[in-house]
Image: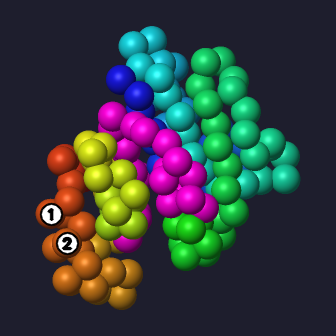
Amino acid sequence: MKVLIVSTEKLPVPPVKGGAIQTYISGAVPSLKQKHSITIIGRQDETLPDKETKDGIQYVRVPGGLLETYRAGVVEYIKDQSFDLIHIFNRPRLVLPIREVAPKSRIILSMHNDMFKREKITPEEGKEAIAQLDKIITISN
């Protein structure tokens, strides 16, 4: 299966500057790559190239920092690609624009904290995002 993992706009993958989600992704992909073609899209970093293949994993890095900037880079990349599965980490506001350019891909959203709060996403956009997902994975204590 051809899989795209969408990290957040805050920190790069691999986790050269830390980050729980980035560390989680880096820990999971060695196992996933055994049976799947893995691409990870994340934010650019001055210590990493914008594109590279390392240990069988393709890395694509786009401008980050602000969600709007990151979203534009992610959508621009995905629109010219084809993935069986797109796994978005902790950014429900990326679901609708990604669905728009990847209508046939299955989309999973992993939630790690309160990104569905009203201050971060409107209830309407949240409901629309959920309706476009194939699965939602959450964590709890």
139 relative to 64, above or below: above
Along the viewing direction, whichever of 122 and 62 lies nearer the viewer: 62
Look at the numbered discs 1 and 2 and tell me whether their residues touch, using CB distance below 8 Å.
yes
Residue at x 77%, y 53% (from the top left corner)? 45
Residue type beneath disc 1: Ala
Which residue does the numbered mark 1 point to in the structure image? 131
Along the viewing direction, whichever of 6 and 2 lies nearer the viewer: 2
Residue 16 pos. (x, y %)? 72, 43
Neighbor class of circle 2 (other Cα within 10 Å; few <14, some 14-19, many 20+) is some
Residue occupying the far right of the picture: 46
The CA span between labels 1 and 2 is 5 Å
Under tag 2, what secondary structure?
A: helix
Q: Quadrant of the N terminus?
A: top left
Does the magenta run of residues contain 74? yes
75 relative to 15, above or below: below
Left or right: residue 80 versus residue 136 is right
Q: Is residue 127 visible?
A: yes
Residue 130 pos. (x, y %)? 19, 63
Residue at x 16%, y 73% (from the top left corner)? 127
13 relative to 102, above or below: above
Residue 14 pos. (x, y %)? 65, 38
Q: Which span of residues is magenta-colored? A: 73-94
Does the magenta run of residues contain 85? yes
Residue 76 pos. (x, y %)? 56, 59
Checking the image for residue 128, the label placed there is: 2
Residue type beneath disc 2: Glu
Residue at x 80%, y 43% (from the top left corner)? 48
Q: Is residue 141 visible?
A: no
Under tag 1, what secondary structure?
A: helix
Neighbor class of circle 1 (other Cα within 10 Å; few <14, some 14-19, many 20+) is few
